[in-house]
Structure formats: structure tokens, C-alpha cells
Image: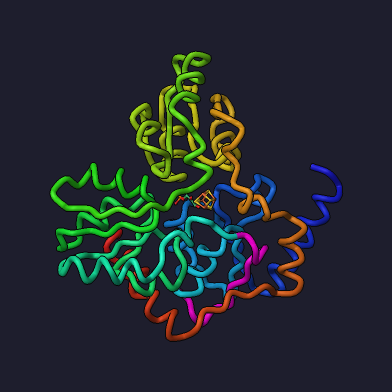
């Protein structure tokens, strides 16, 4: 660690205490940012933490939909982002008109939105899911028809585990996870034949077919940490390597290409964390009426995923 980094970290800790802020970070932000966070986790864990923590203010080291969800779940807390332009493109890949069309076509449909979606989309949905609770939540719904938005790959993965329901899919995707190809995995397997392949369900189905384990970021970390194996090929965003290596210094983790990199998550830097804390901005603002409607889908997720 450089002297500059050490100074910034000290300033962050001081500001955080003074201003009563809890710092939440996703596993895809850089390791040095994960290091200063109070809690690091997958999207589900972070949504729960946003509700559980006593601090009056939350600083979110992640992309817009994460901060927005924290605000919707905690209208009385102040939620600050590190970079207001750190956004997930997938969150914008479905529009409200499409939801209305499907609702007209299928009377009994449940609109299930991945947490990687905007507040407007959550407000039009019946329930929200994350990659770690999607199967549990969808199984618990009484509806036979499920309109799964926006991620096509996660939707198809969930549908495979719940054959008794009829899914309608959308065409959203994550450019980071879909950049990982089956060919790259085969190449990585040639180099490391004994390594297990651990993948996020936002990957395409041909990648998932070659995987030994499929799960959210936290689930991938838990699987690798509890496994008796010591070599793993990791098919998700590279930020996860920090925690994998921290928890398992003796194990080896391999990437499969050069594009396992989310440019939006990488907008989060220590310098910007310090700036956001000093100015207590940019603040996440969600209108009361919209937040109320979006909260229904998020609160239902928290209840069904218990
Ligand atoms: P999880 O951490 O919930 O697995 O989510 C992955 C993701 O893409 C967040 O942007
Ligand atoms: Fe969105 Fe993919 Fe980046 Fe996650 S990794 S924030 S899904 S673009």
C-alpha cells in the first residue's frame, strides 16, 4: 500500500465516523475499495444490510440500481453513491410498455424483475429477485406464468430449475458475463485440467453447461472456500478475485479472458469515496410515490427469500 492510499483510508475512516455512514460494497469493485467497506457482498446480502444497519447514512460502492434499492428500502436514510454515473446497462434493457403488453396477454402472470433494474421497472413488477434467491422466490409464487426481466440468461437458468412453470423471457444481458465464451473455458481447461469451473448465472447457457458450480458472487466465494479442490476457473467479473484470494491464499484462481471487467464498477475509486463522504453527495433521490411502489417488489423478495 502506498503512503497516499494509507492517508486516504485514514481520512475515509474519520469522515465515516463523524458523519455516521456505513459503507457497503459489491464484490466487483476494486480490492482497495472492498478493503475499506464495512460490508462487502452480493446484491442480496447488500440489500439486507442496507435495512439492518443502524447508521443514518449509507455510502454505496456499486452501481445505481444498488443505491436505488437501498434508498427504496430505507426512505428515511440518506443514501450516497460514490459515482453517480456508475450504472448497469442491463438495468435499462426493458421498458414498461413491454410489461403492460405481457400483463394483457397472460392473466395470471407474475412479473419477476432481477434486482439489476431501474426503480421504474421495480414499481411495475410483482417481485424482485437476485441471482442468489431467484429460484427460491419464483418457486414460492403461486402463478404459473412468469415474465422474467431483464436478464435472458438468468431467466433461462431459473426456468430450467422450475419446469412446472411457464416462463416468458426478455432479451436483456450483461455484456461482461456474455463476453465469456465456451471456447475460452475449453482453452482454460486445457491449461488447468483439474480446475473446477465456477460461473455466475448471467453467463450464457453453453458456458453454464461446462460449469461445475453456478451461483451468485457470494455463492461462488463460499463454494471455492469450502471445496477440497485448490484450482478454479472463475466465470464472472474480476473484482471477485480479491475476496477469493483473501479467503484462500493457498488456492489458485484463473480467469478466462480479458473482458471480465465491468467498466461501471471500476468507476469506484478510493479518491471518489473520500470526496463523496466529504460532500455527502451525490445523493440518491427516488420520488415518494415511485419508491412506495418499487418497495412492494423488493419487500416481497426479502420476505419470500427468508
Ligand atoms: P450478485 O453479486 O448478486 O451475484 O450480482 C452480480 C451482478 O451482476 C451485480 O451487478
Ligand atoms: Fe451490470 Fe454486468 Fe456490470 Fe453487473 S457486471 S453491473 S450486470 S454490467
Figure check: 138 above or below 72 = above
Quadrant that contains the N terminus = top right
* Residue at (34% x, 54% y) in the render: 170
Q: Would you say residue 75 sits in the magenta stretch?
A: yes
Q: Would you say residue 27 sits in the magenta stretch?
A: no
Q: Residue 104 at what x, y percent from top left?
A: 21, 71
Q: Residue 17 at what x, y percent from top left?
A: 69, 69
Among the 4 quarters of the image, the one containing residue 144: bottom left
> Mainly helix, strand or loop, the magenta region?
loop
Residue interval drawn in magenta: 73-86
Residue extending furthest toward the right: 3
Quadrant that contains the C terminus = bottom left
Q: Residue 92 at what x, y percent from top left?
A: 48, 62
With 274 as the anchor, is 203 left or right in this view?
Answer: left
Way the structure is coloured:
rainbow
Q: Residue 208 at what x, y percent from top left?
A: 36, 33
* Residue at (58% x, 77% y) in the render: 78
* Residue at (47% x, 30% y) in the render: 181
Figure check: 18 above or below 179 = below
Total numbered labels: 0
* Residue at (59% x, 43% y) in the render: 239
With 250 as the anchor, is 51 left or right in this view?
Answer: left
Amino acid at each position: 500500500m502506498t503512503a497516499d492510499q494509507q492517508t486516504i483510508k485514514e481520512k475515509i475512516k474519520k469522515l465515516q465516523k463523524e458523519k455516521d455512514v456505513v459503507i457497503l460494497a459489491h464484490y466487483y469493485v476494486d480490492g482497495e475499495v472492498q478493503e475499506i467497506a464495512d460490508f462487502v457482498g452480493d446484491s442480496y446480502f447488500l440489500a439486507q444490510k442496507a435495512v439492518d444497519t443502524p447508521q443514518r447514512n449509507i455510502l454505496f460502492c456499486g452501481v445505481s440500481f444498488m443505491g436505488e434499492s437501498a434508498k427504496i428500502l430505507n426512505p428515511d436514510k440518506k443514501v450516497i453513491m460514490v459515482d453517480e454515473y456508475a450504472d448497469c446497462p442491463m438495468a435499462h434493457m426493458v421498458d414498461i410498455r413491454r410489461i403492460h403488453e405481457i400483463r394483457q396477454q397472460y392473466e395470471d402472470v407474475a412479473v419477476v424483475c432481477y434486482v439489476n433494474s431501474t426503480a421504474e421497472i421495480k414499481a411495475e413488477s410483482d417481485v424482485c429477485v437476485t441471482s442468489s434467491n431467484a429460484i427460491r422466490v419464483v418457486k414460492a409464487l403461486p402463478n404459473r406464468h412468469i415474465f422474467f426481466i431483464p436478464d435472458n440468461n438468468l431467466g433461462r437458468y431459473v426456468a430450467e430449475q422450475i419446469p412446472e412453470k411457464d416462463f416468458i423471457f426478455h432479451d436483456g444481458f450483461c455484456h461482461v458475463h456474455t463476453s465469456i465464451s465456451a471456447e475460452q473455458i475449453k482453452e482454460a481447461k486445457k491449461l488447468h485440467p483439474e480446475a473446477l469451473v465456477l460461473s455466475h448465472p448471467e453467463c450464457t447457457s453453453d458456458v453454464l453447461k461446462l460449469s461445475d458450480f453456478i451461483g451468485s458472487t457470494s455463492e461462488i466465494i463460499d463454494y471455492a472456500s469450502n471445496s477440497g479442490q485448490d484450482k478454479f476457473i472463475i466465470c464472472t467479473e474480476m473484482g471477485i478475485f480479491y475476496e477469493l484470494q483473501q479467503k484462500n491464499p493457498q488456492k489458485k484462481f484463473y480467469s478466462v479472458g480479458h473482458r471480465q471487467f465491468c467498466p461501471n464498477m471500476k468507476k469506484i475509486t478510493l479518491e471518489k469515496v473520500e470526496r463523496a463522504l466529504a460532500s455527502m453527495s451525490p445523493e440518491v433521490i427516488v420520488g415518494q410515490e415511485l419508491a412506495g411502489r418499487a418497495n412492494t417488489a423488493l419487500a416481497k423478495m426479502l420476505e419470500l427469500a427468508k
